[in-house]
Amino acid sequence: FRMYRARQAAKYMSEGDNILDIGCGNGRFLMHVSKYGKFNIYGTEMPGNSAERAKRVEGINIKIEQIDYYDFPNKTFQVITMFHVFEHLAEPKKTLDIISNIIKDNGYLIVSFPNIDSLQAKMFKGKWLHLDPPRHLFFFKPDDFKDIMDDYGFTTIKTSFFSIEQNPFGFQQSLLNAIFHKREVLFEYLKGNTNYVKDYSRLNLIAQKLFAQTTLPLFVISDLVASLLDKGATVQFVMKKTK
């Protein structure tokens, strides 16, 4: 999935262009970007294990802290990306102000986040995986976000609601959340968080995992249908700075 995103981002760049990934995690996405051309690669990430791993990726200029005013000169970046980062921000308006200043004229912003207007959100409400309390701080409906970005001078050139990476598992885990008293048990189990899932037997956890594996095709199809209705559980925009 990182390779696919990197290939898509590279389509909007030429040799020597600058790219910034806000919330770059362990840096793997930017590592893949470097394979598609000679670009100047930057990332920001909050202090932690992911940031330490990103520091070890060759060719990334990384700031280990939240992005701030005056980190970069105006009109520096041809492409700025935020993949499932925006909903975590304590000061979203400040971040959008900064992005609007440091992106080049006719530069591209690629941003993705959970879709609070999705079928999953409406169906599962408080049991929906992508609410992810307490890490997700706020949500926008896609049309509202587009209106906000239009005020910043961005034109939406591509919108996608289909995500095999995010949406099928979101449906599966939300169903399990509706069944079990504790949310995100399978998700935490797959991440190796043994302390979180200690109340569940190994047989129970294996059964949840088998459920996710065997029903995946069904939920991929359901996501395709939801995306055709613009109601997929997540949304990704490609936006161009046009004014």
Image (cartoon, rainbow, N blue to C red):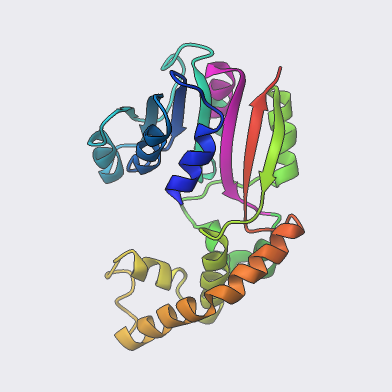
Nearer to the camera, 133 or 61:
61
With respect to residue 24, does 130 lie above or below? below
Which of the 4 quarters of the picture holds residue 240?
top right
Which residue occupies 41% across, 72% down? 186
Which of the 4 quarters of the picture holds residue 71?
top left
Which residue occupies 54% across, 79% down? 215
Magenta stretch holds residue 111: yes
Q: Looking at the picture, how far across and down is residue 170, in whole percent? A: 54, 65
Which of the 4 quarters of the picture holds residue 125?
bottom right
- Residue 116: in sight, yes or no? yes
Q: How many marks?
A: 0
- In the image, taking residue 5 as reference, residue 64 lies left or right, namely left
- In the image, taking residue 125 as reference, residue 59 lies left or right, namely left
With respect to residue 113, does 79 lie above or below? above
- Residue 119: in sight, yes or no? no
Report the magenta residues as a range.
95-116
> Extreme top residue here?
73
Which residue occupies 73% across, 25% down? 151
Nearer to the camera, 218 or 24:
218
Magenta stretch holds residue 131: no
Q: Looking at the picture, how far across and down is residue 42, in whole percent? A: 38, 26
> Extreme bottom residue here?
203
Which residue occupies 54% across, 44% down? 87
Q: Looking at the picture, how far across and down is residue 13, in whole percent? A: 52, 26
Question: Could you tell me which quadrant the C terminus lies in?
Answer: top right
Nearer to the camera, 205 or 223:
223
With respect to residue 15, does 163 lie above or below? below
Q: Looking at the picture, how far across and down is residue 101, in whole percent? A: 56, 16
